[in-house]
Every structure is written in structure tokens, then in C-alpha cells.
Amino acid sequence: MSRIGRLKIKAQLYCGDELAMGPGKADLLDAIAREGSISGAGRAMGMSYRRSWLLVDSMNRCFVEKLVETVAGGGARRGASLTPTGVAVLAAYRTLEAALAESAGSGAMAELDALLRAVPLPPVRDDG
């Protein structure tokens, strides 16, 4: 999610009624790639393991192939990593975010910005 001046851009992709990908899920994928585990990624983002796991489960169910692969138990391969599909989805989502941010500099945004107040007027009182 990026904020450009007074414009906040947040791309969200849906699978039916379920949010398949958004800024938070993309950040979680980045954290999993960096930390090597769902629990480590959750801790790094200030969320519980359960919340992190539910978000990963949602992403894995929404895309045609899993985005995150987990290996339970001991050994050097335990933890979680992005699958090739996960890497591709994350890269495509970040490209989409960048394109949306670039389009925010369009004439339409300049026109809206010129018509937008810096702060809202006080609420109208209903003395009726």
C-alpha cells in the first residue's frame, strides 16, 4: 500500500468473496522469504502465528498453485519458503503496485487534488 500525497493506493485481488492478495499478504510473503518460517514472519510483522498461518492458508487456497510450502519437523529444510508460483505472484503484485503508484501522477489526480480541501469543514449541526 502506498500513499502518494493525499492519495492512498491499495490493490486487492479477490478469489470469489475471499481476499487472495493485498498489501498485507504481500508483506507477509516478503517476511516468509526473509525469515524462512511462518512463525518468524508473523513475529517480524507483529502478528500471531495463527493469524499468519490463516493468511498463508487463504493464499494457498486462492491461487492455482500454493504460494508457500511448509516443511514440518527437524532438519535444515524445516520451515516455510515461497514456491516458484509464490515468487511470481509476489513479483507481479509488486509490479502492479508500482504501476498504480506511477499512474497516480496523472492529470486526473492533479485535478482531484486541486478540488480537495486540505482539512474537512466542521460537521453541520442539526438544530432541528
Image (cartoon, rainbow, N blue to C red):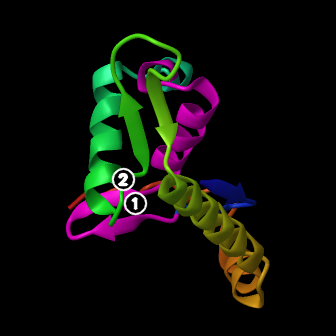
Say above or below: 69 vs 14: above
| SS assignment at label 1 | loop
Specify start and end residues of the magenta stretch as a single range.
11-40
Asked whether 125 or 1 is in front, the reply is: 1
Q: Is residue 126 visible?
A: no
| SS assignment at label 2 | loop
- Where residue 112 sits, quadrant-wise, is bottom right
Q: Position of residue 17 (x, y in %)?
A: 20, 66
Gap in angstroms between the C-alphas marked 1 and 2: 51 Å
Residue farthest toward the top in the current orientation of the protein: 74
The reply to whether the magenta stretch includes residue 73 is no
Which corner quadrant holds the C terminus?
Answer: bottom left
**Mark 1 or 2, which is nearer the eye?**
2
Lateral position of residue 16 relative to residue 26, left or right: left
Q: How many marks?
A: 2
Q: Position of residue 4 (x, y in %)?
A: 73, 61
Q: Position of residue 103 (x, y in %)?
A: 72, 80
Q: Is residue 92 visible?
A: yes
- State which tag comes first along the sequence, 1 or 2: 2
Q: Amino acid at mark 2?
A: Lys
- Where residue 14 sits, quadrant-wise, is bottom left
Residue indicated by mark 1: 124
Label 1 packing within 10 angstroms: few (<14), some (14-19), many (20+):
few
